[in-house]
Amino acid sequence: MATDSVHLRCALLGAALIALPMAAFPQQSPPDTTSEEQSSTLQEVVVTGTSLARAAFDTPLAATSLDADRLAQLSSSSQADILNSVPTIKAEGGGGEVAANVFIKGLPSGGQYQFTPLEYDGIPVFSTFGLNSSAFDVFYRNDLGIERLEFVRGGVSNLFGPGSVAGVINYISKTGGARPESRLQLEVAEDDRVRGDFALSGPVGSADNLFYAFSGFYRSDDGPIRTGNDTKGYQVRGNLKREFDDGSSITLYGQYIDDQVQFYLPLPLDGNTRKRVPGNDGRDVFSVQTSDVAGLGFAVPGSGFTTSITDGVVTKDGSVAVVFDKKLANDWSVNGKTKYARYNHSFDFFLDGDGIINRPETLQGFLTNRNLGSLANASFTYQDTGEALPADYLLFPNRFIDRDRPARDVTGELNLTKSLSAAGFDHSLTLGTFYSKAKADDFNVTTAYLADFNNEARLVNLVVTNSAGGQTVISQSGLLNAGAGYVNNHHEATRYAAYLADQMQRERFTFDIGARVEKLEGDIRRERTATFITDASTPNLAQPLRDVIWGTGSFANAKVDATEWAVATGALYKLTNTVNLYANAARGYFFPEIRSVVLNAQDQPQTYNAEIIKQAEAGVKYDAGRLSGTVSALYTELKDRRAVSFVNDGQGGTIERVNIVSTESYGLEATFNLKILDHLDFDGNVTYQEHEFTAFDTNPLFIGNELLRQPNLLYNAGFYYNDERFDAALFNTYTGTTYTTESNAIQLDPYNIARLDVGYTYHWDQQSARIGFDIYNLFDSDGITEGSPRQDTAQSTGGAYFVGRPVLPRRWTVRFTFDF
């Protein structure tokens, strides 16, 4: 804590030192666009990851921009609702509000944001992925203070800052202006969801060069799937921007979050239809989570352990950042960003089975599967009432994991730019540096329990009697296996990068070229484990209740490092005033996740080499007023990827298995926007891709197979109407056929998620009020986004049950929005 306080004081001191000389700092402003240009998404100015703001139509890369109105239509419960609308991205939101699984361009991933940094205002939410497995979106939530989203892939832009040639997801916040603006919103949805949002901005007092923007929300929610556990909390964000007479500016950003959400895992479905199945009470089971496990605990060496599983995913604390932009003499400029973040974070979640059987079992089936004898010699009773379970009831033994994951991050970026004319081109040269130091803990305890098969299941106790009359306690207070797994890791990553880029333009030609060199240094600290007898006094306990796996207090320590380079080029040719041809190519890298490093008996790490990605894209951009769009061809190759899978160990615990793989993908992408009428648009995109493993170290038979959980076909299409009074949107996201694992043994059917959003806005003076009605998953699709990743290739088909995660069910929402 003392170290964190020092970091925070240093960040604030750095902000103050930067602010002092800012009276001489002019800012580069993005070019103006006419109202006609603004009607086309291809004419919207892109600023992500670049020192030269340009319209998407004039960049030799692919860029997607979504404004605040479109974000409001897309938002429902998670980042996945928004990112699913972006070309080449498949985003799964079946887990709820956080930890969206994001897949892009046929790159091998277990999900989350492994290839696409998540940024707010050009600053990474967290600089290094893979210190633990928490997704970036656990640290930030979207609110009414977001101005737009930009997703940029390819070209030199993705060499800047934290860098990723695969793409950067950047949300840009609203900043204040001379006119005060205020927006309040109340959202009410079924399953007792209530959310209040606000966004305020304007000048600070009578100052004509100091502006603020402040936004936040509070939300309480019992759905969309009821578990008996809470989803509630809030976030506030804000920025303070100082502008100077010469056009310079400095902006201070801050965020504080205190929020908890429930996270949904796969559950047993019908083995043939893969529809939800009824529980013991006859109602379809939507979740196997239960609040009955609250307070469940057991003895551990030297103390006791009590679960916090009912809290779900908790994030507290926040971040502070400073962004500045200065223009020097002779067309030189300098801009920079620095940020300090600290989060107290835990990610507690229920699993999708006990790691042994992983399906609902009859009472006798449970006994038989564990060699515990016959039902006549067993006593199954409810923990809360002591009553006996009916003989025809089903059980679902399951596990949960308590994961404590505090994290800290310091980042800094400094860019020096020069504008000049040479050889008939206007050049924008950038020389930049990036630094980050990230730390994250990963303390995990796995616990198994016995419960019946119902929504909000009840805990079950079990005592068996042998032929000699001796008794054995198999489940006590619902506890089935105390301390089934234990992990205590601390990982750090320090990154140093330098990059150089030139963005060149003249008449009909635009060229980009750039290079980046980066070094990563990683520190690894992992506690060793052993099995301890912690309850030798209670008679007749089964071994899983008597013994626990726990830390020994001895740690393995290791260091890794790697240095790599990236280069990117791009070219655009203005064929006509309405048609641009473009192409880009890049050779880049990803540093292996530090959590994937395996240590040998001497605590020496395996080789730590960067994963090399090569990609190319070429296409056409068309913009002719009422019709605009793009068509492009894509190619991506990734070598020596350390793919991490979270799988069962066969003993009731879990392990993070590492496969070294190489992949290749290619495909076609198209985007389109057609103005059918002045106020009616038809808008969407489609992606077709082929992808396969070209190397697989642990199982060469998988070479040539398709990547898991990635479809060949994705599309988004919808009608959008807005005449400033009435607005309506009807749109659909289609996800094609996928495979559950690398073996390609189990295929999941394609599915659609349709949305309907309608509203009416009343205007008076400078104020307006809107009432809107939204239905997510309009036709209540129950498409399956994944099977059981924990079972991996052990999952089979043809049985009575299939463990999978359906998309979230249909849900209606009413929103009241007031602007003044």
Image (cartoon, rainbow, N blue to C red):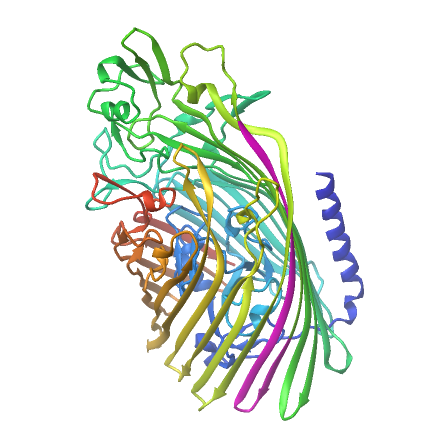
Give the image location of residue 558, x and y in percent. Answer: 64, 45
Farthest-out residue, top: 469
217 displayed left or right of 673: right
Q: In front: 218, or 280?
A: 280
Q: Above or below — where is 223 with respect to 446?
A: below
User: Hey, which residue is sitting farthest bottom in the picture?
Assistant: 424
Q: Which residue is more in the foreground, 362 or 343?
A: 362
Instruction: Report the front residue among 736 and 55.
Output: 736
On whether residue 506 falls in the magenta region, the answer is yes
Residue drawn at the location 77% of the way across and 57% of the way down:
16
> In the drawing, does residue 690 fall left or right of residue 567?
left
Q: Is residue 529 above or below residue 371?
A: below
**Magenta stretch: dominant SS?**
strand
Residue at 78% x, 80% y: name it. Answer: 329
**In percent of the image, x 55 and y 64: which residue is there?**
589
Residue 162 in the image: state x and y as whole percent. Answer: 60, 62
Write the residue at 36% across / 55% down: 708
**Picture coordinates of residue 610 (x, y %)?**
56, 60
Query: Can residue 31 be spotted in the picture?
Result: no
Q: Say if the magenta span includes residue 559.
A: no
Quadrant position of the N terminus in the picture: top right
Q: Mark yes or no: residue 71 visible.
A: yes
For the record, the magenta segment spans: 501-530
**Count of numbered tags:** 0
151, above or below 641, in the image = below
Query: Residue 455 or 818: which is nearer the viewer?
Result: 455
Residue 164 in the image: x percent, y percent?
55, 64
